[in-house]
Amino acid sequence: MSFLRVDLRSSATTLDKIQHEEPPRVHIHGNVGIITGDVTLVGQYGGKAVSGVYRSTHIWIFNAGRWQLLMNQLTAAEK
């Protein structure tokens, strides 16, 4: 995640639109939450224009009384 933080701070990555294509699916396993779904993204990544539908997975952990993001994965969905 640190590379994304650096990329966002440098303005090489900007998101103009994030739209869920359907309600996200949420699964809770103890103190771990997994959220999956398809999203449409429009913007720039690494200074290059990107747009399309991506499969999104977020893994969260409930720690010290709050949810913390552990991992985020985006994979281009087949058209």
Image: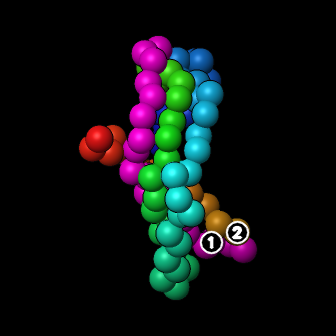
Q: How many marks?
A: 2
Secondary structure mostly seen in the magenta stretch = strand
Residue 9 vs residue 25, the one in the foreground = 25
> Residue at 49% across / 77% down in the picture?
27
Which stretch appears magenta? 47-65
Secondary structure under badge 2?
A: strand
In this picture, residue 31 sits left or right of residue 56: right
Q: Position of residue 3 (x, y in %)?
A: 46, 32
Outermost residue on the bottom side: it is: 30
Is 77 above or below relative to 58? Answer: above
Q: Position of residue 43 (x, y in %)?
A: 53, 24
The answer to which image quadrant residue 8 occupies is: top right
Residue 18 magenta: no
Q: Which of the colour schemes (rainbow, by chain, secondary structure, one colour) is used? A: rainbow
Residue 59 vs residue 63, the one in the foreground = 59
Whether residue 8 is visible, yes or no, is no
As measured in the structure, the alpha-carbon distance from the residue carrying label 1 to the one carrying label 2 is 6 Å
Q: Disc 1 marks which amino acid?
A: Asn
Tag 1–tag 2 contact (CB < 8 Å): yes
In this picture, residue 59 sits left or right of residue 77: right
> Residue at 40% across / 44% down in the picture?
54
Q: Position of residue 24 (x, y in %)?
A: 53, 63
Q: Disc 2 marks which amino acid?
A: Arg
Q: Which residue is mark 2?
A: 66
Is 23 above or below relative to 8? Answer: below
Q: Which residue is mark 1?
A: 63
> Residue at 58% across / 18% down in the picture?
10
Q: Position of residue 14 (x, y in %)?
A: 58, 24
- For the C terminus, the image quarter is top left
Outermost residue on the top side: it is: 47
